């Protein structure tokens, strides 16, 4: 924990978890889609559902979808801005199983009808955790440039992935592995210290056994 | 690495001013240089000033519970606390109301307690003619103590109650005030310890689960308590219990608090007849935090 986790961030109120964290959740969905959504479906769970209206959680997530940061003074007007920019928004509440109290399930669609669904939780102080992307389990903060790779569960694949990263001189901060069953499909989540160039990402996507490679960089659109 | 105890912080402050020890540690922690750290902290200070300047007395929160209170306080003709304290109280209210009305604030350490630091620092700067540099130093002092509190206990109301939010802000502010007035690191630790002692056990019981009632008014408590604690420390009054032990006690009390009193909107003021009525009216169904 750095001193700037204790002092700051500069944010639009009223709640670091229900407002600032919610903006970041919307921003994650936008970054993963890598485009301005034309449609957004937002499901609020738990405390987000119960007190979200009073905390502006709905407006905060929509603000993130529009590309705003947690300190953007336009956050309170985001619903109107979404309308003006042609983004159709549906906000509803529901129960997600085994979810953190401050969780949202956000599905966004771009103009080409490509869709991304992300489940994320707000942990307090504006920090978030991404729980899943398109149903793929994961657990990461979005604070680092992150690769989310769906790959076949077979010997050696991780070393091939890390070899590509090494060849591009990308330093790995953390690695997580998930799988449904032995020899099935696995999800590899890799957090890196610096942004990853498109060539590296293409190389990873082309590896034998890699089904899909998704990249998240909160600092800029991929 | 981050300071794990006030004791370590005080030892680091034997060779240099305490605020500078915190700055140096931040540079090591994040691999940043001094200029980068100073610029970041200065930006936070300026955002704090702006959060006070941007106050709009006509703005109301979505629930209708907050807004206009700071203007009432600032305009009060006769006060028991006197002119200076009236300004402190009005500043605390204005930032806390800004926050409730989706205005822009600096979480210090949290959004719910964002009024405390500006309330004690801005009026003091005006009265004493202190430089911006000194204000930024004060933020380093506050952040240093805040870091210890966050590490040993918590600054989250959902975890340890309001003592961890308003209480922590108050302790951080008390230490910062001692620096502003030229006190010693030991006095900073005493001021922080006394401020935390005074609100130990304070529960987090937001009506309708919103960061409004009593949160906005508790920012006033945090600011006034910080000033009184700093004054005691500067007068040579010590805390009989060392600051680290006070923080550990606060953590133990926080852990002992039932969930109803940790930001779930189910206990304390939230559970009163009127509190429940307000929750119904605002459409909030606070449950499970």
Image: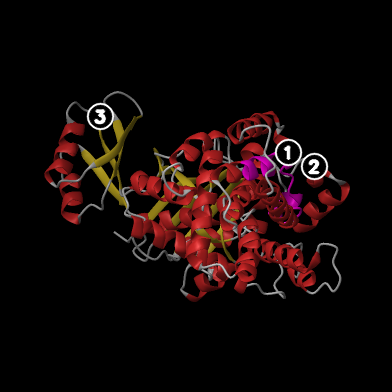
Determine whether, in the image, residue B127 is placed left or right of residue A143.
right
Q: Residue B148: percent from the left, percent from the top?
A: 52, 39
The range drawn in magenta is B190-215
Kind of element beneath mark 1: helix
Kind of element beneath mark 3: loop
Q: Which mark is residue A153?
A: 3
Q: Residue B276: percent from the left, percent from the top?
A: 82, 49
Rendered view: A212 above or below A88: above
Q: Chain of mark 3?
A: A
Q: Is residue A94 visible?
A: no
Residue plotted at (63% across, 41% down): B190
Is B196 contained in the magenta span? Answer: yes
Q: Residue furthest front?
A: B236
Q: Which mark is residue B261?
A: 1
Residue plotted at (53% across, 70% down): A73
Mark toward the start of the polypeptide (1 vs 2): 1
Q: CA distance from mark 1 to mark 3?
A: 46 Å
For disc 2, the marked residue is B268
Rendered view: B276 above or below A82: above
The crowding category of the residue bearing disc 2, from other C-alpha atoms within 10 Å (few below 14, some 14 to 19, many at least 20), is some
Is B177 contained in the magenta span? Answer: no
| Residue toward you, A53 or B161 | B161
User: Which quarter shows the C terminus of chain B?
Assistant: top right
Q: Chain of mark 1?
A: B
Decide: marks 1, 2 in contact (CB < 8 A)?
Answer: yes
| Residue toward you, B185 or B284 | B185
Residue plotted at (62% across, 33% down): B242
């Amino acid at each position: 924990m750095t001193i700037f986790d204790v002092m700051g961030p500069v944010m639009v109120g009223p709640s670091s978890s229900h407002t600032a964290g919610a903006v970041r959740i919307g921003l994650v969905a936008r970054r993963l889609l890598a485009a301005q959504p034309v449609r957004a479906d937002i499901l609020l769970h738990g405390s987000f559902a119960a007190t979200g209206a009073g905390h502006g959680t709905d407006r905060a997530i929509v603000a993130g979808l529009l590309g705003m940061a947690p300190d953007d003074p336009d956050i309170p007007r985001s619903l109107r801005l979404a309308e003006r920019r042609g983004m159709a928004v549906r906000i509803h509440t529901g129960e997600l199983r085994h979810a953190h109290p401050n969780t949202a399930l956000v599905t966004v669609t771009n103009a080409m009808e490509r869709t991304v669904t992300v489940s994320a939780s707000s942990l307090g102080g504006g920090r978030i955790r991404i729980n899943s992307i398109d149903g793929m389990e994961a657990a990461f903060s979005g604070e680092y440039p992150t690769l989310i790779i769906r790959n076949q569960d077979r010997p050696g694949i991780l070393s091939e992935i890390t070899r590509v990263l090494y060849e591009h001189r990308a330093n790995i901060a953390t690695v997580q592995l998930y799988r449904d069953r032995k020899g099935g499909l696995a999800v590899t989540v890799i957090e890196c210290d610096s942004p990853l160039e498109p060539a590296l990402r293409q190389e990873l996507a082309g590896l034998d056994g890699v089904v899909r490679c998704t990249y998240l960089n909160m600092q800029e659109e991929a | 690495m981050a300071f794990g105890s006030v004791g370590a912080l005080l030892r680091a402050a034997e060779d240099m001013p305490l605020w500078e020890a915190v700055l140096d540690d931040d540079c090591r922690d994040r691999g940043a240089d001094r200029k980068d750290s100073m610029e970041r902290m200065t930006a936070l200070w300026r955002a704090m000033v702006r959060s006070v300047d941007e106050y709009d007395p006509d703005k109301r929160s979505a629930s209708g519970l907050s807004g206009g209170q700071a203007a009432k306080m600032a305009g009060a003709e006769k006060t028991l606390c006197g002119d200076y304290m009236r300004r402190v109280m009005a500043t605390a209210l204005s930032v806390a109301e800004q926050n409730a009305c989706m205005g822009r604030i600096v979480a210090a350490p949290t959004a719910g307690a964002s009024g405390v630091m500006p309330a004690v620092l801005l009026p003091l700067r005006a009265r004493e003619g202190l430089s911006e540099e000194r204000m930024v130093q004060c933020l380093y002092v506050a952040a240093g103590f805040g870091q210890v509190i966050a590490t040993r206990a918590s600054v989250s109301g959902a975890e340890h109650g309001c003592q961890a939010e308003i209480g922590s802000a108050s302790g951080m502010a008390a230490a910062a005030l001692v620096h502003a007035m030229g006190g010693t690191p030991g006095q900073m630790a005493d001021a922080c310890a006394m401020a935390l002692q005074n609100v130990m056990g304070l529960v987090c019981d937001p009506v309708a689960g919103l960061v409004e009632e009593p949160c906005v008014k508790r920012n006033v408590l945090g600011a006034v308590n910080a000033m009184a604690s700093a004054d005691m420390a500067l007068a040579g009054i010590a805390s009989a219990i060392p600051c680290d032990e006070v923080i550990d006690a606060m953590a133990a009390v926080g852990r002992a608090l039932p969930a109803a009193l940790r930001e779930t909107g189910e206990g304390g003021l939230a559970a009163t007849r009127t509190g429940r009525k307000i929750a119904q009216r605002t459409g909030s169904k606070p449950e499970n935090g």
